Amino acid sequence: MANKLLKEFSGIQQLKRKNFSSELGSFSVTFEPNLVLNRKFYQDSISIIEKTGTIKGMHFQQGQYAQTKLVTVLQGSIMDYFVDLREESPTYLDYGSIELSDLNHNTIFIPEGFAHGYISLESKSIVSYKLGAPYQPKHEVTLLWNDPDIGIKWPQIENLHISEKDTLGLTMQQIKGLS
């Protein structure tokens, strides 16, 4: 599949966090309802990534537990990826990416119908999520991070760190067989 530009994906929004600096430090606004189409969120979560080259994903939830996500980086940096799983979409099975960091203040809104994951570009990166539905392990699916049919071009990092759950992810062909 193809790596598309953010603007080609219906529903994906790139946002800039407001950031205010002074001699004492900085203050940043991570969420304002009017920036993401007045979406309601169910849960806030934080992930602390210890090592550079840690891959998390590609995760999504099915059915009534499908999640919207608002993702930002509070410390460090990641390359964030999303795969369009909406069969009726012109970007079906295409993927996109954006760098999120504490320096560029990028935030991304990902609607329902996308698999989501990232790779840490720095150690001690802290990723903040707002989720539109509760985590439901029975409805979660992991798309294999390196599924050859999707063909995500991950950054070339010598030592990758991937959980067992993510290494055992399903290919898109296997996921289609679940339906």
Image (cartoon, rainbow, N blue to C red):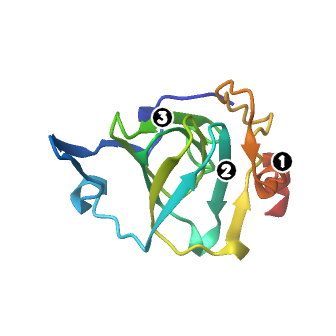
Residue lying at the far top of the rendered structure = 156
Q: At x 44% / y 39%, what residue is drawn?
A: 100
Q: At x 77% / y 38%, what residue is drawn?
A: 146
Density class for disc 2 (Cα within 10 Å; few <14, some 14-19, many ≥20) is: many
N-terminal of the pair, mark 1 or mark 3, is 3
| Amino acid type, residue under disc 1 in the picture | Gln
Q: Which residue is identified by label 1? A: 173
Q: Position of residue 107 (x, y in %)?
A: 38, 45
Closest to the observer, 1 or 133: 133
Q: Which residue is identified by label 3? A: 98
Mark 2 to mark 3: distance in Å? 15 Å
Asked whether the viewer can see residue 11, the reply is no
Tell me the mark number nearer the camera, choosing from 1 and 3.
3
| Amino acid type, residue under disc 3 in the picture | Ile
Q: Which mark is residue 80?
A: none
Density class for disc 1 (Cα within 10 Å; few <14, some 14-19, many ≥20) is: few
N-terminal of the pair, mark 2 or mark 3, is 2
| Quarter placement of the N terminus | top right
Q: Which residue is identified by label 2? A: 57
Q: Secondary structure at mark 3?
A: strand
| Amino acid type, residue under disc 2 in the picture | Gly
